[in-house]
Amino acid sequence: MQHHVYICLVLIHILCAMLWVGGMLFMTLMLIPALRGLKDPQLMRTLMQSVGKLYHRWGWGSLIVLLITGFLLLDYRGISHTQLASAAFWHSPFGTTLAWKLSFFLLVVVFSVVHDVSAIRSAKRENPTPEQRATDRKVASWLGRVTLLLSLGIVVLGIMLVRGNPWL
Ligand code: HEM
């Protein structure tokens, strides 16, 4: 792989990471507090549903691109399929950091699926009671927080893949 292709892949990988993590930070730190401040639950629900739909599309798109570019970047670093299948690789500092990163990535995918399923279920519910709405909101908010923390962890592990893991 030529060097300029590698630079492009890193750029795409980082742009997708920005889109995924930046989107979550924007919603948590700006959009949700701003909507809460309007004190209009119906407007908040409508806006959160339409922003959620867009984030769903862009978010899943970026996770798929992160996975593809991630494996291409490993290939550039000379880490082949045979190496990925060897126990020695996963015991090296790079392999251990990558194992943590991939485990966090898998958890992010699982939490995102659960988040999507519960959002669809709550949107489909006819005439929900205020208690059901409050529970749905709480579940969505906790799933979102855990996914954000795991994603920030992935960013730290990504940085350590390139610059070394100080704990290994
Ligand atoms: C939510 C998912 C992900 C995020 C937020 C993310 C984020 C990052 C970040 C911030 C870097 C650091 C770049 C730098 O410091 O120069 C990085 C590097 C890297 N990531 Fe990811 N990543 C994700 C998923 C993946 C996956 C699934 C793989 C699969 C193997 C992967 C493989 C890599 C590799 C190999 C590098 C080193 C790139 C290089 O050679 O410079 N990443 N990632």
Image (cartoon, grey):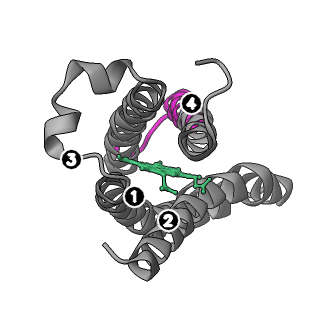
Residue receiving disc 2? 16
Q: Quadrant of residue 27?
A: bottom right
Say which residue label 1 marks.
66
Identify the residue at image location x=44%, y=39%: 128
Q: Earlier in the sequence, mark 2 or mark 1?
A: 2
Q: Is mark 3 within 8 Å of ligand 1?
A: no
Q: Residues within 10 Å of mark 1 (few under 14, many from 20)?
A: many
Q: CA distance from mark 4 to mark 2?
A: 19 Å
The reply to whether the magenta stretch includes residue 137 is yes
Kindly report the distance in space between the C-alpha atoms of the residues bearing marks 2 and 1: 6 Å
Inspect the image, locate mark 2, and give the three-letter code of the amino acid beneath it.
Cys
Disc 4 marks a residue whose amino acid type is: Val
Q: What residue sits right under mark 4 in the picture?
A: 146
Report x, y in % for residue 15: 55, 69
Q: Which residues are magenta?
A: 125-144
Compare marks 4 and 1 and give the one earlier in the sequence. 1
In this rendering, the label closer to the viewer, 4 or 1? 1
Q: Residue at x 54, y 58 (%)?
A: 17
Residue that appears at 83% across and 60% down: 38
Q: Secondary structure at mark 1?
A: helix
Whole-number angstrom distance, CA of label 1 to CA of label 3: 18 Å
